[in-house]
Amino acid sequence: AKEEVESGGGGLFGGLISKLKDGLGKDDEVQGLEELLGRCEVNAEVAAASQRSRAVAEEEEKLREDRRSLLAGARVGRSGPEDKSKSAGSGVAGAASAAHEAMDRLKERGEKLNILQDKSERLQGRAQEFHEMIRKHNLKESSKKWWQI
């Protein structure tokens, strides 16, 4: 790395170091600046690596969140101890609501059954009337002779 710095072609500050060597001419001062600039390069590389690692960590956290949200949908039927305590209060309200809804449906069903029973009684009465009318017609027709038909 020192050879690259001395040749002036190395790293972020290589060109600056070669210009400083040409302008200052003193080796001690240039060497101190080379060390300082070398540390700056290292710090810049460390900062870039740190930024990349933060980005990777954020991406991993996002993947974990996505996984949690996907798995939460799969756990609908399962409940832990804290879920049971939360759902106890809502369970009573839910049960009361379900019972009220069931009662409403039962009343509607009873009304529909009563209407159906009335219709079936009317149909049975009309069927008996039709049967009597046909029976009388058949008796009347059976008493006729063949030439009266």
Image: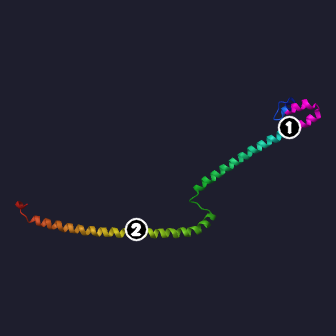
Residue 2 lies, with reference to residue 146, above or below; the image says above
Tell me the quarter of the picture where residue 133 sits. Answer: bottom left
Q: Is residue 26 above or below residue 49?
A: above
Where residue 42 appears, x then y in whole percent? 83, 40
Residue 56 shows in the view = yes
Query: What distance separates the C-alpha of mark 1 from that of mark 2?
Result: 88 Å
Q: Which secondary structure class fits the magenta region best?
A: helix
Percent coordinates x, y for residue 111 in the rendering: 38, 70
Mark 2: which secondary structure? helix
Residue 2 seen from this side: no
The circle drawn on residue 8 is none
Looking at the image, residue 67 sits to the left or right of residue 27; the answer is: left
Question: Quarter of the image containing the N terminus?
Answer: top right
Q: Position of residue 91 (x, y in %)?
A: 56, 68
Q: Which residue is mark 2?
A: 109
Highlighted magenta segment, given as a residue range: 16-35
- Asked if residue 32 lies in the magenta stretch, the reply is yes
